[in-house]
Image (spheres, rainbow, N blue to C red):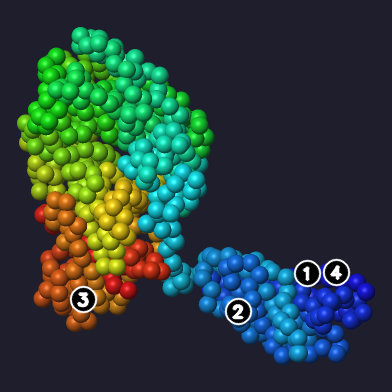
Amino acid sequence: MKILRYTSCLAAGLLLLGACSEDEVTFPEGEGILIETPVEVECGGVYASFTALYQMKSDTRYTKAGYVVAETENPTIYGSVYDATVSGDTIKATITGLAPGREYHVRAFMNEYKGGVIYSPDFTFTTGEGSLEEQLAYYRGPSYPDYYVDLAGWGSRSQWNLANVHDPSVVKAADGYYYMYQTDASYGNAHTEGGHFHARRSLDLINWEYLGGTMPALPEWVVPKLNEIRAGMGLEAAAPDENLFGYWAPSVVKVRDDLYRMYYSIVVPGYINGDNSWGERAFIGMMENSNPADNAGWVDKGYVITNASDKGLNFNVSPTDWGNCYYKFNAIDPSVLVTGSGEHWMIYGSWHSGIAAVKLDPSTGKVAAQLGNPWGSGADIAGYGKLIATRQSGNRWQGSEGPEVIYRDGYYYLFLAYDELSVAYNTRVARSKNIDGPYTDIRGVNITDNGGDALPVVTHPYKFANSPGWVGFSHCTVFEDGEGNWYYASQARFPAGINGNDASNALMMGHVRSIVWTKDGWPLVMPERYGAVPALAIAEAELAGDWEVIDMAYSFANMKESASMTLNDDHTVSGGVWDGATWSYAADNSILKVGDTELYLKRECDWEDADRRATIVFAGLTTTTTYWGKKSL
């Protein structure tokens, strides 16, 4: 006996086969039915049709025929079962209720009378893209966990995705990938196994592949440069412990398709002149790479800038004299931008006097001006940059850092991280027609010349229902995909004591969110993270119902919790900050108007939902308050 090898062809959706006799088929021992591998006849976004040939011994009967389908190999009748029709020697069925764009496994089966279940070999197929309506109905968001304690260790780094992210910088490279680089920080310090300025990449901003450290060890120039400056200040050479250096907040910029520059911060441990003097300085250096896919290809190009002081050699400032610290500018947190005219600028700084702007030489990536000694009067240190943002004029303890600068539609936008990073961190934004200022906020407050708290609040510690909430939510990177879509990415932290874990505030998760721009050109970061939800137009009929709303008026170190609001069918509002107001909807620009406030709508993933289904969210602002909201599922 032999197994017949059928010769088949697929023509106009029909499988044309020659018949065979029982004598030409070898049946498995003890079985009277043999089923061939299914053949896909038609496949859509949510369904697929199959045929499968079978042979049966003359003394065998069957009681049921059908198909089984699953997202894992070799599905059985204990999963999803679909009845089939049997016509001649063919088992036919259409399987429905599938999700678009997903890979499945299918097997035909027959129940042998007074015998077992006979299965065909496994067949793999992928459903079609489907309509936007189908995609939305079956949408499920990313499945990776936010509370990633079990995956935090170095041995699980291939599963990190956006776990252990801090102070990210994202650039879209010529190969289509988004590359992310970050501060050396992780839960349990797992990152210390793999160098510095760790990298990951993604094609879709959802699934991130961990690549490893880009810098294997402290650059050779750092300690000699430190001691060169110390010698000029009349100080002895230092030998700081290399295990205590800080590797903070890189910024990556694409200069051209074959040249990428990473500006990074190295923070030196210790004090300038013993325990009763201000802390030692920081440096910004730079690396280059022709292809970021080669994560080991970063070549260090050395020193760019260091802390500048306008106090000369009067460096014996107490380390607790916050408002009078020794340095004017702090050489950390670079953000580098190539302007439309080809100028290269670096915006940098943290606390101290505020944020500085310095012009770079495009050919070298280094500071264009001659850098003299990093101490002296204002004129002596002019090459170290120009103050462009200050939160408290005349006070060296700013509570602002992490600048990020972008250009869009005639304005340079300066995003700033405010307050301490473990809980209170929040994001603000101001803008200017010139990269070096003056920058003004949404109220017209000049934060370059006069200082002050910039508004609007872009992100703030927050909590939707069914979530522990997020704190420490700032120090952003803002980037565009080349098609006019803008994104905001930063870290956010769990509050302390989650799941009984005293260290849960050290769990840092990377958040990537869409930005929607208001009619007046101000950025609104969406209240839910990006999850590639199908962009089906939002209809007014979808808006009536219950919502969660967060009033993000600034409140130091407090999570702003959501309140309930109902949009009634009669276009009135019940509950929340707009209780008693009326609502209307402009479908052409997806703006929901509640009272006098315009709220910009978007479909996003509901990360607080157990299945991470799609929902509708909004963000809106006034000159004093930002609002976030989402439709309750």
Q: Residue at x 23, y 58 (%)?
A: 462
Dot 4 or dot 2, earlier in sequence: 4
Tell me the CA gap for discs 4 and 2.
Answer: 31 Å
Looking at the image, can residue 361 be seen?
Answer: no
Rounded to the nearest angstrom, the CA distance separating label 1 from label 2 is 32 Å
Which residue is label 1 attached to? 9
Which residue type does callout 4 highlight? Arg
| Residue sitting at x 29%, y 68% | 466
User: What is the x, y in percent for residue 398?
Assistant: 13, 37
Label 3, residues with CA under 10 Å away: few <14, some 14-19, many ≥20: many
- Which of discs 3 and 2 lies nearer the camera? The answer is 2
Q: Give the spatial CA distance, label 3 vs label 2.
A: 43 Å
Q: Amino acid at mark 2?
A: Tyr
**Mark 4 and mark 2 residues within 8 Å of each other at the beta carbon:** no
Percent coordinates x, y for residue 72 in the rendering: 60, 67
Note whether 221 is above or below 260 in the view shown: above
- Res 567 label: 3
Say which mark, if any, is on residue 78: 2
- Callouts 3 and 2 close, C-beta under 8 Å: no
Mark pair 3, 1: CA separation: 57 Å
Q: Check disc 3 and report its element: helix, strand or loop.
A: strand
